[in-house]
Image: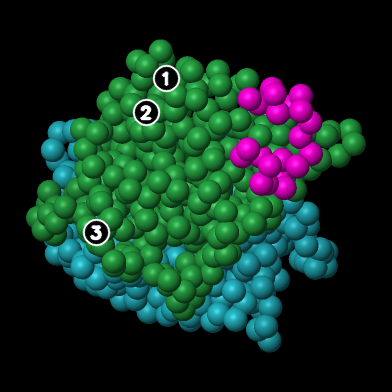
Chain colours: A green, B cyan
Amino acid sequence: MSEEILFIPREVTTEENFAPGHRACIGCGEALAVRLVCKALGKNVIIVTATGCIEIISSLLPQTSWRVPWIHTLFENVAAVVSGIESAYKARIRKGKIPSKGVKFVGFAGDGGTSDIGIQALSGAMERGHDFLYVCFDNEAYMNTGIQRSSATPYGAWTTTAPVGEKRPLGQMTWKKNMPEIAVAHRIPYVATACPSYPFDLMDKVRRGLDMAGPAYIHVFSPCPTGWRCRPDISVELGRLAVETGIFPLYEVVNGEYHLSIDLPELRPVREYFKHQGRFRHLSDDVIEEIQARVEADYKRLREKAGLE
Amino acid sequence: MGRIVGLEGSFAVAEAVRMVNADVIAAYPITPQTHIVERLAEMVANGELDAEFICVESEHSAMSACVGASAAGARVFTCSAGQGLELMHEVLYIPSSMRLPVVAVAANRALSAPLSVWCDHSDAMSLRDIGWIQMFAENNQQAFDLTVCAYRMAEEVLFPAMVHIDGFYLSHVIEDMELPAEEDVRDFIPDYEHPFVLDPDKPVSMGCYAPPFIYPETKKAQEVDFEATKQKILKTWEEFGRIFGRYYSPVELYRMEDARIALLVMGSLSETAMLAVDEMRDAGEAVGLIRLRLWRPFPFAELRAAVKDIELLVVLDRAISFGMGGPVCSEVRSALYNLVERPPVIGFIGGLGGRDISVAEFRYMIKRARERVNAGEEREDKPELIGIRE
């Protein structure tokens, strides 16, 4: 089923359920990703969003960018709020209070709201098996509050709370938490990684995750020119470079089976990805080599899981 | 017709939730609230209650799930205690601001450290400003009645409502009570439709972001509407009384006719206080009891009317505001401050972490308060902690 292509250019709706006019920075990869995800979701959804960039750029009272029902309450509780909404629909349909309309339930959060402060609520909701799709828009730091490091910030990246100093010249000193693998460990039916630089792949995955009964998790790599200290016109290119270097491989795990969405016979050097971004400007050759080795090892492990090694 | 049964306070609450036909329950276990969730889980498993029971992984998620479910139009319930309410704290402000009629029961418990699972009102006092209708029950009958009433109030005014029951004293004690006929409760709590629910046929955005140019207006609207809940609360209790024969009011008086001295308490302690008042009355002392049933919105007018003819008001707090005194005493004082004639208010703190308070201690409080006033010490705000082993 993973091979099946659901979206092709002329069949993608021109309808924008995430309306233009929002307040995202220029070149925002996350806003692009949200727009594409919303196209794939369609109208029959309820979206819950965590506090963060997407919430503040889209919902400044008295305006809203959301043309589908949308709710934001707090930072760390998206998956719990979705659990409540899904349960409400289930109970009210069963009790004959509302008709069954096949409404889908979706949670949106950033990397901090997912892999740091929201991980408990997400783990609980995945374990309980609610029928929902959770999309993590990963821009690799707390961008909304001003580029502070999260557990999804990559090794060696500069952030305002992992600054580059004489005593600590590295920036982020820990390796990125592998959130998709944590989702896989919950043995949910669908986990995928995606990137708006591959829009049809992203939309296909959203649709597949949505149609799957039970929890689905999609981790969307979302370039952030403001926080990554790069030109705003290269967000899409950076997404492609992250995939082509093996830093962010695209894959699906359907009922525990791994499938690489794009298998690269040869990875491009990570240096090509780093050179466009101010957040990696300070990295020494040694550190870049260290990262290169780690990326290659991780990619090999992933290919093994997909039965390709 | 109702029937007389012996029920634990926790089971009384569970019966109320069953009879109002809640759709979604989300809860996390914590002593002394556990019997409520256990009984509800059993009811759902047995088919006595058709609801989704979400066994969430924390109290924070319990309230979050209730918020989500309520925003989707469901009738919801959760309950917690002590540390659980503290973990839930952040989320508690949400349903009030977003006008969602979530109903919760708190089985009041002390706060760590040191760890104590036993009753006091420290947890309740940290919830004063969350914007919920809040009521205190003094026995299991009230635990049931007020939980039923909470649904009616919350759904009419679109604000959340919380019933406080003393942990163990009510949650784990079996008492005689009248369980009304289910159909009477269903008539009293009809199905409701929230005017704005999360529904793809009618998209709404909830929980938007408000910069300074609009935030204060949202808070003014909330406060104006919250103040206005008072009338609906009174109407709910009046109607409840007409149907079920038990009448409640924001400030309930016991033997206050011609009283010169009044005790003021909240929660289950008032039953012991009543015994103390009876004894003192028998001894010829003009002592009465004031019970704060409604805690939020605060019943200013009723309290002022209750104390207008007395010479001394003695307030017992079951919590400490460190460096300040008793929180209830502070609020009572501030409610009376602008009256031209007002009684001196002497505060005591007791019953912390499940320490019992005896009839003798209530008599002691009255005696000490009188001595302090006679010695001209009434302006010394320091409350005395009673029952402490020195």
The label number, if any, that marks residue A10 in the structure image: 3
Residue A293 is a magenta residue: no
User: Closest to the observer: B282 or B223?
Assistant: B223
Q: Secondary structure at mark 3?
A: helix
Q: Which residue is painted at 68% across and 55% down in the image?
A: A146
Can residue A36 be seen at all in this image of the molecule? yes
Identify whether A150 is placed above or below B230: above
Q: Amino acid at mark 1?
A: Arg
Q: Which label's residue is closer to the chain start, 1 or 2?
A: 2
Q: Are marks 1 and 2 on the same chain?
A: yes
Q: Which residue is mark 2?
A: A260
Q: Secondary structure at mark 2?
A: strand
Chain identity of mark 3: A
- For marks 3 and 2, give the one nearer the viewer: 3
Residue A45 position in % (x across, y down): 27, 57
The label number, if any, that marks residue B273 in the structure image: none
Tag 1–tag 2 contact (CB < 8 Å): yes
User: Closest to the observer: B72 or B167?
Assistant: B72
Q: Secondary structure at mark 1?
A: helix
Q: Main secondary structure of the magenta part?
A: helix
Q: Which residue is mark 1?
A: A303
Chain identity of mark 2: A
